[in-house]
């Protein structure tokens, strides 16, 4: 099986999370005449994509700034 790079997997998740629910929304709304079903499919698909992106790529990130030691903090206050 072919392994995807991290960027390729990210793009694949984004495209499939937008295109697939959008097409299914169109099919359910226009072709089947069920706009509520189409809207539900789109919302669930898009939300699922957002959750996957958060869980796989955003959750592991560490958004903290650099830690300063006590000497640097005192120097900053004196300057």
Image (cartoon, rainbow, N blue to C red):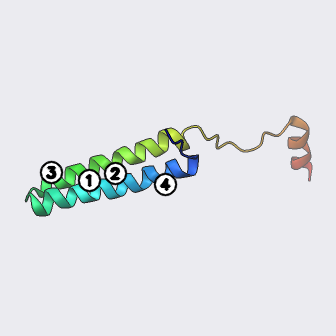
* SS at badge 4: helix
The front one of 67 and 56 is 56
CA separation, marks 1 and 2? Answer: 6 Å
Give the SS element for disc 1: helix
- Relative horizontal placement of residue 59, taking residue 68 as reference (left or right): left
Give residue 34's position: percent from left, percent from top.
Answer: 9, 56
Q: Which residue is at the far front?
A: 1
Contact between labelled residues 2 and 4, with CB atoms less than 8 Å apart: no
| Relative image position of residue 24 (x, y in whole percent) | 22, 55
Left or right? Give the position of 18 relative to 61: left
Residues tagged 4 and 3 counted as in contact (Cβ below 8 A): no
Q: Earlier in the sequence, mark 1 or mark 3?
A: 3
Q: Which residue is mark 2?
A: 46
Counting residues from the N terminus, which is met first, the one under dot 2 or under dot 3? 3
Q: Residue furthest left?
A: 33
In space, the residues marked 4 and 2 are separated at their CA atoms by 14 Å
In the rendered structure, find residue 11 and report the number of the disc placed on it.
4
Looking at the rendered structure, which numbered label has been put on residue 42?
1
Q: CA distance from mark 4 to mark 1?
A: 18 Å
User: Which label's residue is closer to the chain start, 4 or 3?
Assistant: 4
In this view, the residue in front, 4 or 77, is 4
**Tag 2: Cα neighbours inside 10 Å, few (<14), some, or many (≥20)?**
many
Q: State the separation of the CA atoms marked 2 and 3.
A: 14 Å
- Label 3 sits on a secondary structure element that is helix
Q: Earlier in the sequence, mark 4 or mark 2?
A: 4
**Residue 25 drawn above or below residue 51:** below
**Residue drawn at (92%, 46%), measured in percent from left and top?**
75
Front tag of 4 and 1: 4
- Toward the viewer: 73 or 36? 36
């Amino acid at each position: 099986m072919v392994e995807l790079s991290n960027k390729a997997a990210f793009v694949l998740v984004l495209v499939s999370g937008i295109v697939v629910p959008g097409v299914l929304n169109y099919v359910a709304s226009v072709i089947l005449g069920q706009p509520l079903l189409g809207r539900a499919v789109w919302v669930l698909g898009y939300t699922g994509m957002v959750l996957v992106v958060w869980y796989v790529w955003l959750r592991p990130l560490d958004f903290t700034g650099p830690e300063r030691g006590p000497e640097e903090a005192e120097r900053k206050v004196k300057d």
